[in-house]
Amino acid sequence: MKAIDVRPGYGVKMDGKLWVIVGYEFRNPGNLRSFVNIKFKNVQSGGQVEKRCQPSEDLEIVDLDRREMEYLFSDNTGATFMDTENYDQLTIPADVLGDALLYLRPNAKTVVLCHNGNPLTVELPLVVELKITDTPPGIKGATATNQMKEATLETGLKTKVPPFIETGETIRINTTDGSYASRAKGE
C-alpha cells in the first residue's frame, strides 16, 4: 500500500518487525516535495519511531484483527477486556496499554487491535467523557484572562480546565493530548 493511503491503526511489517501506525501527517511545504510523516509503535518493545516517507513509497501492510471490546477492570496483571461478540475475556498487560487506561472508564467500549490472537494496542475515540473528582473552586472575576486550573478526573488523569468548571461535572477530553475539549452535553 502507498504511504499516502495508510492511516493510524494499520499494521506494518518493517525490518522484519511488526509495527502499528499511531500517527500520520501529510505535509506539502511550499517549494519542496510533499511527504508523509508517520509514527510507528513497535509491537514487541513498545518503542516509537517517526519516519518520513514519500507519498508513493510502498509499505507492507499486515492484517490486524479489530475487535470491539468492553473494558471491565484493571489489576496488577493488566486490564481485563471482554469481547462484545463472544464474551471472551482478555487481559492486556499495562505496558501494551500505555496511557490508554487514563481515558477509559469501566464498561467503556473500545477497539482492540490483535495479531495472531495477541493484543497489540487499544484504539481510543478522539474524545471521551469523564467526570471531575477534584478541582479547586473558580476565582470570581477571573473571566478577563484565559486562566486554567488543574482538575483530577475519575480515571486519575490530570488536566487543565477553565475556571467555571466545578467538581462533579462531566467534561469531554481529547485523547491525543489529554486536553480539555468542552463540557459534556446534558450538563
Image (cartoon, rainbow, N blue to C red):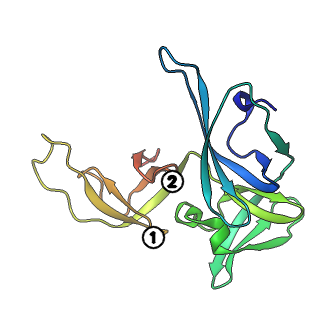
Residue occupied by mark 1: 156
Q: Secondary structure at mark 1?
A: loop
Is 120 on the left or on the right of 33, as rendered? right
Q: Secondary structure at mark 2?
A: strand
| Residue at image location 29% in from the left, 65% down from the top | 135
How far apart, in angstroms, are the residues tagged by discs 2 and 1? 13 Å
Where 65 falls versus 153 (above or below)? above
Where residue 80 appears, as percent x and y from the top left, is 72, 74
Where 144 falls versus 124 (above or below)? above
Residue farthest to the top, as pictured: 31
Is 40 on the left or on the right of 5, as rendered? left
Label 1 is placed on what type of residue?
A: Gly
Q: Quadrant of residue 77?
A: bottom right
Whether residue 167 is visible here, answered yes or no, is no
Is 60 on the left or on the right of 102, as rendered? right
| Residue at image location 69% in from the left, 26% down from the top | 55
Label 2 is placed on what type of residue?
A: Glu
Q: Residues within 10 Å of mark 2 (few under 14, many from 20)?
A: some
Q: Nearer the viewer, residue 15 or 169?
A: 15
Residue occupied by mark 2: 129
Q: Quadrant of residue 84?
A: bottom right
Where residue 117 appears, as percent x and y from the top left, is 88, 65
